[in-house]
Image: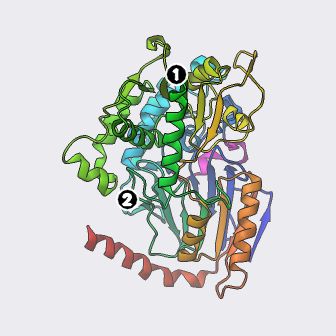
Amino acid sequence: MSKRTREVSLGPNEDDVLCITPLGAGNEVGRSCIVLSFKGKNIMLDCGIHPAYSGMAGLPFFDHIEPESIDLLLISHFHLDHAAALPYFLEKTAFKGRVLMTHATKAIYKILLADFVKVSNIAVDEVLYDEAQLNKSLERIEQIDFHQELDHDGVRVWAYNAGHVLGAAMFMLEIAGVRILYTGDFSRDEDRHLMPAETPAINPDVLIIESTYGVHIHEPRKDREKFFTEKVHEIVKRGGRCLLPVFALGRAQELLLILDEYWEKHKLHSIPIFYASTLAKRCMRIYQTFINMMNERIREQSKIRNPFEFKHISYLRSLDHFHDSRPCVVMASPGMLQSGTSRDLFERWCNNPKNGVILAGYCVEGTLAKHIISEPKEINTADGLTLPLRMSVDTISFSAHSDFQQTSEFIDQLLPPHVVLVHGDANEMGRLKHSLDIRYQHKKKAVEILTPKNCQSVRLEFKGEKIARAVGMVAAEHARWEQEA
């Protein structure tokens, strides 16, 4: 049985009660931050900011906990909505626990957050932390490999590949024999450079899983690539500029691989493609360093040439070096047009019907990218002016998040007694819960679907007699990894 209450407590819990509390990503997408409390142990899963808000308003609800009570903090991947509040939490609260992320995540996190600090200093009045605080926080971050088991004061934790972006991890935790799997953002589809998410051989008692796309099902990857490349080609063919707002890392690399191949095949050498990012070259070096973490296709290509050295892509450090005089394609961050280069180019190009913007990732409610999907006649600039929106607006999802088919099949394979949905807006999450409830209502093994809001706790009772049965299964999976290594 489970029950929910709005009380949030990180103090001593009833001995058999697992408490799960979203401080962010509860019925929303953004500021992922989930706190688990069980047997006197407190673990935080992710520590991100909300892309629709700035300054303190974008942080998780840290005031609902006592930071010094958190024993362990796990970061699933480097995206800002999962990791950008970490320096604040480490340097401006009483938190003294351990922090874990994968090697690739830490390498990219360092670069992304340094850029976030620079952009915040320009665009935001209320800066969360400075570069010195970011650098100091890095010293406290420990790295973990996939399948490496770590034991911290009675909490066992290990990581699985989550797909999504380079280095993204799902975390399995075991406390007193109770197993909790946190997916973070995950994708079970193999794309041009990443392997799909793993499916654990061990069945968790509780699954905390993203619900970003609700009941939507992604189109086949080849169909999406065809629509995307044809739409880009259509815009430049009519004499326009094509804007591709993206996160600096993650889907950007996937789209670059697609465009470079298409440009070569169709001999579009006269039309430039720019990747507008101060981070581009440094991060590409990291991608090359961790090439063995990518799929077989990329690993095989790397034996012949570097797959991330693009023939048709030029790097653009800033718009000061950009001669805007002819049709072109520009990939620029941020992906939701909140500020920065993508916002500047959007405002420059939005009143010309020859131009087009293609939104290739998930757009969070409250951002400009989400707003223009409805094709309003006018938009407000960052300076408060009004401009007509005449450029074409298209959406095609290359967002490496699980869709309904992937999510439901993943749950089918694991059949956890309790599923906690996070990282989805209230409507999408509600539809997913309804569909999953119907799916499992007549199954022999009951699956309970829970959808807590921010600062609303789920309380699950686990009896002590379960503990002895858990150990052998965990040992068997680790033995299998050792044989495969």
Instruction: Specify few, some or many for label 2: CA neighbours under 10 Å numbering under 14, 14-19, or 20 or more.
Output: some
Q: Nearer the viewer, residue 436 or 151?
A: 436
Residue 318 position, x and y percent, is: 46, 17
Q: Is residue 142 left or right of residue 460?
A: left
Q: Is residue 73 magenta?
A: yes
Q: Nearer the viewer, residue 198 or 67?
A: 198
Q: Which residue is mark 2?
A: 146
Residue 369 position, x and y percent, is: 66, 35
Residue 255 position, x and y percent, is: 45, 41
Label 1 element class? helix
Q: Nearer the viewer, residue 386 or 177?
A: 386
Residue occupying the point 64% across, 55% down: 213
**Residue at the bottom extreme of this rendering:** 444
Residue occupying the point 70% across, 25% down: 390
Instruction: Specify few, some or many for label 1: CA neighbours under 10 Å numbering under 14, 14-19, or 20 or more.
Output: few
Residue 91: image quadrant is top right
Residue occupying the point 35% across, 30% down: 312
Residue 473: image quadrant is bottom left
Residue 40 position, x and y percent, is: 61, 63
Marks 1 and 2, the one that precedes in the sequence: 1
Rendered image: mark on residue 118: 1
Quarter the C terminus occupies: bottom left
Q: Is residue 308 above or below residue 224?
A: above
Task: Please state which amino acid type lies under the numbered disc 2.
Answer: Phe
Residue occupying the point 69% across, 31% down: 368
